[in-house]
Amino acid sequence: MKGTNLFLKIFTILVFLFLYSPIIVMVVFSFNESKSIGVFTNFSLRWYEKVINNPEVWKALFNSFWVGAVVTIVSLILGLMMAMAVTRYSFSGKSILESLILIPVIIPEIAEALSLLIMYIFLNIPLGPVTVIIGHVAFCISYVTIVMRARMAGYDRSIEEAARTLGANEFQTFFKITLPTLYPAILAAGLLAFTLSFDDLIKTLFTTGPGFKTLPLVVWSSAARGGVSPELNSLSSFALSISFLFAVFRLRVERRLER
Amino acid sequence: MGFSDTLLKHIRRNVTVKVSLLLIPPLLFLAIWFYAPFFIVGLYSFDMINIQREIVFKPSLIHYLRVLSWTGAMKIFLRSLYFAGVTVILCLLIGYPVAYYISFKMKKYKDLFIILFIIPFWVSFLLRTYAMMSILDERSFLNVLLTSLKLIDSPIRIMYTDTAVILVMVYDYLVMMVLPLYANLEKLDKTLLEAAYTLGASPVKTFLKITLPLSMPGIMAGFLLVFIPAVGEFVIPELVGGPNNYMVGNLIYEFFMGARHWWIGSALSMLFIVFILSLVITYVRKMGERGLAF
């Protein structure tokens, strides 16, 4: 028993080491003075200077943010409609509808992205930011609906009925009662949609037009072209810190909502 | 009373109208931008779109037959199954002890350790893959360290091999195994274990007869959550594998973007999607609807 416990403890520590060391090595070597990715010579910010002075990076970051924002708003509106229909009303064909919502989460993104590209080409739709946004929304709707439905499960509709009895009309009830009560569900789903869009590579890669790049695309093209380099280490660490800050924010918001 | 008022009153009363108003916009969006593309790919796969991009009503199975009789494609499909299978098994072997240790042996810091486990997965999938590249590289710190400690004679050449692809997949998908397992083990009634001990069962027997069978739903959920993205993986073989380590995703990509043979690419996509869906349907049949509410 003692031996098993010790084994489990050491094993768990090793797994944590396995999880953290690649990220730590990548971040540490982004501060390396020399071009080496194996020997650390001196602390330096030269690779960060290169990244910060690269206008392509800033443009891509800006693109990632605004695409993420538009995707979040559109998929929140569409997902909220879907979640409300599914949780509030019973109608025939509901289980088919629920599978239709789930399928985008299951299908491998590469098949989904290439099919969408084929359709864009088939219909002669010019590729660019709009086609990227459409591609992101197409899978974000499902995630938003699933998260909202889970959070709306215990929703008490009696306050809505109270509002209606007190003379509020349908729209007043929706904007003054329903929407504020659903705020936690909307926030959780919105943060998820933004993260999915912000981190997306495959859909963006195949639905973007010439010159329109998001941050993951910049990382991808330079990793696929030149492999590991100190400059890409610092760009990745820079991108990592953004995802990280965002995740901390998400965690704090969710914690507060659960209280 | 104006027309719009009458209309509004009608909407208020009629549930069917309300449901339709709520459902039409999102469903229309999904139909056009998610399902229609697969319909077009379906037309291509049955040879119903010609080179001039015109629809012709002469369905044929020629592209399916070509894919199914081509050993190269079969080989890549089997390789994808093998890679995903090994990844799932490794995730289970690595993930189970960790989930078990945190759930059963830790008292105070459970939540902290689960968060510490999840933190590396806050980093996006692409960046995690790149981080793995930065230690698998021949010139990497890990190789320099191991050679200078005289543990190895020459740097490990692992990039662009099957091992690299599988290793990175395990690194990227481990969380998908551990989280459902941990949730499952946390719900497990621990008094059952005490009962087994009181009745004289050894720890090994208790584990094999109680803990393991009761954690099967967690294992199955983890299996599905790791296997599906792994079998359809495209980015990892593209970055850390070579042409000899390609998986189905890369093959479909090559047909669409490289060879520009959309008919074969479409037939491949359709077969692959049917495979994935039948896998999920089998799982839902076995585990029930609740199996998908992870």
Image (spheres, coloured by chain):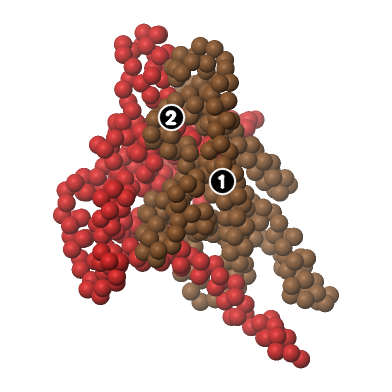
Residue under label 1, please give it: A64
- x and y percentages locating residue B63 in the rendered image: 21, 60
Answer whether labels 1 and 2 touch (C-beta < 8 Å): no
Mark 1 belongs to which amino acid? Ser
Residue A62 in view here: yes
At 60% across and 75% down in the image, what residue appears? Answer: B21
- Is B207 on the left or on the right of B276, as rendered? right
- The answer to whether B110 appears left or right of A129 in the picture is right
Instruction: Judge left or right: residue B193 versus residue B249.
Output: right
Label 2 packing within 10 angstroms: few (<14), some (14-19), many (20+): many
* Residue at 54% in and 48% down: A196
> Which residue is at 59% across, 60% downward?
A74
Chain B: give its colour.
red
Q: Pointer 2: what residue?
A: B132
Chain of residue at mark 1: A
Looking at this view, is B200 or B65 the one in front?
A: B65
Q: Residue B94 at what x, y percent from top left?
A: 43, 32
The foreground one among A247 and A126 is A126
